[in-house]
């Protein structure tokens, strides 16, 4: 099943192949997994840096995770993917 009306949904998923379609562009399963991992890493590091027992480098880890996600999204945009 393919959802083809991009106006009705921001992200359309091809159930058979598992490829997410964003407009006319497609993310590969690797790109989907990598983006999901980077977002989870950013969420985790943003929560950890404000805990009472946060280690010294937690703020640096947050900024590193943020930069990694920004760089990944920038590369996708260069390829024409709307992120």
Image: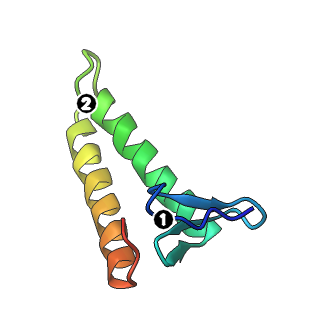
Rendered image: mark on residue 49: 2
Report whether 19 appears left or right of 38: right
Q: Nearer the viewer, residue 78 or 60?
A: 78
Q: Residue at the far top: name it.
A: 52
Check disc 1: other Cα within 10 Å, few if <14, some if 14-19, many if 20+.
Answer: few
Picture quadrant of residue 52: top left
- In this picture the colour scheme is rainbow
Instruction: From the image, tell me which residue sits under label 1.
Output: 6
Q: Nearer the viewer, residue 54 or 40?
A: 40
Which of the two discs, 1 and 2, labels the residue nearer the N terminus? Answer: 1
Q: Residue at x 36, y 38 (%)?
A: 43
Check disc 2: other Cα within 10 Å, few if <14, some if 14-19, many if 20+.
Answer: some
* Quadrant in which the N terminus is drawn: bottom right
Q: Residue at x 27, y 44 (%)?
A: 62
As helix, strand or loop, the secondary structure at mark 1 comes to: loop
Q: Position of residue 10 (x, y in %)?
A: 44, 56
Picture quadrant of residue 46: top left
- Up-down relation of residue 15 to residue 73 (above or below): above
As helix, strand or loop, the secondary structure at mark 2 comes to: loop
């Amino acid at each position: 099943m393919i959802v083809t009306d991009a106006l009705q949904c921001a992200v359309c998923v091809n159930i058979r192949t598992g490829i997410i379609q964003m407009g006319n562009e497609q993310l590969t399963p690797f790109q989907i997994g990598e983006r999901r991992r980077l977002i989870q890493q950013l969420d985790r590091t943003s929560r950890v840096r404000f805990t009472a027992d946060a280690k010294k480098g937690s703020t640096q880890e947050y900024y590193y995770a943020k930069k990694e996600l920004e760089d990944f999204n920038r590369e996708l945009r260069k390829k024409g993917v709307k992120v």
